[in-house]
Amino acid sequence: MSKSIVTSNPKGGFSYDLCRRNAMLSEKGLEPPPFRKTGTTIVGLVFQDGVILGADTRATEGPIVCDKNCEKIHYMAPEIYCCGAGIAADTEAIWYKGSISATLILGGVDVTGPHLHTIDPHGAMNTLPFDAKGSGSLAAISVFETKYKEGLTRDEGVKMVSEAICSGIFNDLGSGSNVDICVITKGHTEYLRNHLMPNHPPTFVSEKNKEHKFSEKFEVLSTKITPLKEKAEIIEEGNSMEE
């Protein structure tokens, strides 16, 4: 009797094989890598027709800005996108011994409507109408807590997400550069790359609607020279201490 190999379809959902392996390694004395403090501001909210995600574009390596215009809103499936705050390599699916040090905001629309979920590095998941993650999350979440309301229109949602990301950019050193927006509705997704560039150098325009050119020479009105070093006279008074 001949034998045939039947391949089964892979099951959907998250695989916990690495979690079981990591638990076994921990029992044998291998310590898991510690969580690292990372930069970034990512946000998401639910509006009347779908979900809006937002992120800044600064990637850091400690105190060093290694990329001023990186993408942090990633395509997962049709009408499903994910924002990543954490180690850039982890958010791009490079796994270190099965450990992922990234905080995620997952948003999308299905047959039941819009959904927004947040996933922490330790695996906790929340379903919320709005949220913010990353080092600039405290500044960003304050915008939502002050202004968010149910039934927001698309324009109101985009404006609020942009304001939240800008709040993180200007109040957190780990966030910066530009604002990316992703608007997800049923059957349509709009990715607004560099929707706002608040740190872009301004262009000066004259009254005649032409770019202003500064003069090559400037007139000196006054001159004052202040010496950096001054002579000081030291006078010793009193008797020296006796031994």
Image: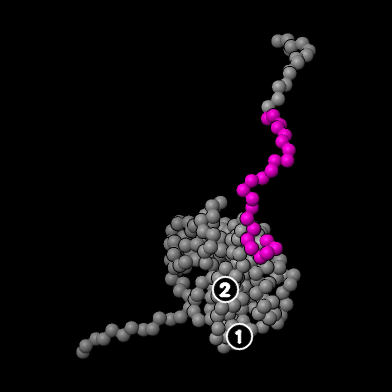
Above or below, comparing residue 73 to residue 63 in the picture: below
Q: Residue placed at 73% from the left, 40% from the top?
A: 221
Using a 10 Å C-alpha cutoff, classify the residue at mark 2 as few (fewer than 14 neighbours), some (14 to 19) or many (20 or more).
Answer: few
Of tags 2 and 1, which is closer to the observer?
Answer: 2
Tag 2–tag 1 contact (CB < 8 Å) = no
Front-most of residues 29 and 76: 76
Main SS class of the magenta portion in the image: loop
SS at circle 2 = strand
- Find the residue positioned furthest to the bottom: 1
Pick the residue in front: 219 or 47: 219
Per the image, label 1 sits on a secondary structure element best described as strand
Q: Residue 65 occupies which quadrant of the picture?
A: bottom right
Image point (45%, 67%), residue name: 93
Tell me where the magenta segment starts and ends, as one range: 206-228
Q: Which residue is mark 2?
A: 192
**Residue at image coords 70%, 63%:** 207
Please, what is the three-letter code of the amino acid marked with disc 1? Gly
Q: Is residue 120 visible?
A: no
Sequence-wise, the earlier of marks 2 and 1 is 1
Pinpoint residue 202: horizontal percent, then vertical percent: 63, 60
